[in-house]
């Protein structure tokens, strides 16, 4: 029986780890909320909470005159709702063109000190939670005993310093409580795996891990380099990977970055869309990507979930990639050391669709006047893709059980060539559901 004590100890540790509460956040680009009022924030918060999201990561660059106004609106909204939904800061060290100052007015410390006592601020392990987008040139600001912690006190700091690479974190482990990897899209004409997540977890022993989950990526109309990374099956596959990686936190990227096409929140007004991107965003809603979040989040957290109805969600670009001009868009981003490819070689001309089923059923997809294709679905989550293969018309999605159509809905039409007035291929996704 000599094995019993270590076995029991292992069970205790496992129980402690399993019982640690997990959280899901959504990344909000505050710079894209200039037209928001407190009521707009209340609507966003309500939609996010209903989807199972725990908090918004308020991402802001420096300097940006929009930040103080909208941060105040966001906290006022969350406090007024009193729903338990939280907010925290994700300081963007690249987005504003200037790194965040550690202390002084309009600084990291001033924002944390102003809002850390709010009932809506997210705390973890008894400390205000904070993150970043990059900031590797300012690591010393966050050091134990450094200017930020000296001014603010205890902080639970989970930065994104992904540009260092897993081998570059080294001695900076002492300056962080957790780590957030921004590496959530695949390189080239491949699908994303969880290899980099596992590498970051291995490189940050003893620290919590925040995993990024994103549905898509098309960087449009920036005036600089515009590129596309493969989205395709990403929304379904990354949520499946959260079960294998088992991070303490998940951050959805993003709620509202319309210029990079990975928004899952509603579009309030085109004035909040980056200049030149509106043509790619108009008529391409992504709200339906939220529909399966209660299920995905429950699975990630190890919670029970009652599948009380059959659901489907589906997404695709609405014309083949060769149906328009690339208009300077490239596949991959050479500025990040990647090999430039044709964007049309990176993304797939296909319909991507998932079904959440009460019990086994047949799922069918019929494009225009073409014959329907059938897929055998099991109880729970299912995911497939169906190539365009030259087919055009409106796709019809159906759940069939025991020979009877249980539910059916029609998506937006797939056309043979781009419908954009500028003649460009739209690498953004149209998303629907029932």
Image (cartoon, rainbow, N blue to C red):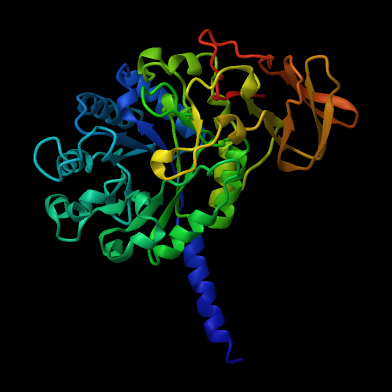
Residue drawn at point x = 49 percent, y = 20 percent: 327
Quadrant in which the N terminus appears: bottom right
Q: Relative to the observer, which residue lies in front, 10 or 187?
A: 187
Image position of 178 (left or right of 287): left
Q: Is residue 52 above or below residue 434?
A: below
Image position of 411 (left or right of 30): right
Q: Relative to the observer, which residue lies in front, 86 or 144?
A: 144
Quadrant in which the C terminus appears: top right
Task: Estimate the x, y position of residue 196 in percent, counting from the top left.
Answer: 49, 55
Task: Estimate the x, y position of residue 393 in percent, counting from the top left.
Answer: 74, 14
* Residue 303 visible in the displayed image: no
Q: Is residue 220 above or below residue 171?
A: above
Seen from this angle, which residue lies furthest right? 403
Seen from this angle, which residue lies furthest top? 421
Q: Is residue 127 above or below residue 316?
A: below
**Which quarter of the figure has residue 254?**
top left
């Amino acid at each position: 029986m000599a094995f019993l004590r270590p076995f029991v100890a292992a069970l205790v540790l496992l129980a402690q780890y399993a019982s640690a509460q997990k959280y899901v956040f959504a990344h909000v680009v505050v710079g894209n909320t200039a037209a928001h009022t407190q009521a707009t924030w209340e609507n966003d918060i309500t939609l996010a909470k209903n989807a199972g999201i725990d908090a918004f990561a308020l991402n802001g660059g420096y300097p940006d005159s929009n930040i103080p106004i909208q941060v105040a609106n966001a906290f006022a909204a969350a406090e007024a709702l009193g729903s338990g939904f939280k907010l925290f800061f994700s300081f963007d060290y690249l987005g504003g063109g200037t790194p965040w100052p550690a202390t002084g007015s309009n600084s990291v410390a001033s924002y944390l000190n102003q809002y850390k006592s709010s009932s809506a601020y997210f705390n973890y392990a008894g400390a205000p939670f904070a993150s970043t987008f990059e900031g590797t040139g300012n690591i010393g600001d966050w050091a134990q005993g450094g200017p930020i912690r000296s001014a603010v006190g205890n902080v639970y700091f989970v930065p994104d310093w992904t540009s260092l690479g897993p081998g570059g974190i080294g001695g900076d482990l002492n300056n962080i409580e957790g780590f957030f990897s921004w590496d959530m899209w695949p390189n080239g004409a491949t699908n994303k795996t969880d290899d980099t997540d596992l590498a970051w977890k291995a490189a940050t022993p003893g620290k919590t891990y925040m995993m990024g989950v994103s549905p898509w990526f098309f960087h449009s109309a920036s005036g600089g380099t515009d590129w596309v990374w493969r989205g395709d099956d990403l929304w379904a596959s990354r949520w499946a990977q959260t079960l294998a990686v088992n991070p303490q936190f998940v951050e959805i990227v993003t709620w509202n970055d319309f210029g990079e096409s990975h928004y899952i929140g509603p579009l309030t007004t085109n004035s909040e869309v980056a200049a030149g991107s509106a043509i790619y965003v108009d008529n391409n809603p992504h709200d339906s990507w939220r529909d399966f979040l209660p299920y995905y989040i429950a699975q990630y957290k190890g919670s029970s979930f009652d599948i009380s109805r059959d659901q489907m969600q589906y997404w695709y670009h609405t014309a083949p990639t060769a149906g328009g001009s690339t208009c300077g868009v490239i596949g991959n981003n050479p500025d990040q050391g990647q090999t430039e490819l044709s964007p049309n070689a990176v993304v797939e001309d296909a319909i991507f669709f998932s079904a959440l089923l009460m019990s086994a059923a047949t799922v069918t997809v019929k494009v225009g006047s073409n014959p329907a294709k059938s897929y055998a679905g099991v109880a729970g989550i299912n995911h497939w893709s169906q190539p365009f293969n030259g087919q055009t018309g409106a796709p019809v999605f159906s759940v069939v059980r025991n020979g009877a159509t249980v539910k059916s809905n029609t998506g937006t039409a797939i056309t043979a060539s781009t419908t954009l007035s500028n003649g460009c291929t739209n690498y953004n996704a149209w998303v629907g559901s029932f």
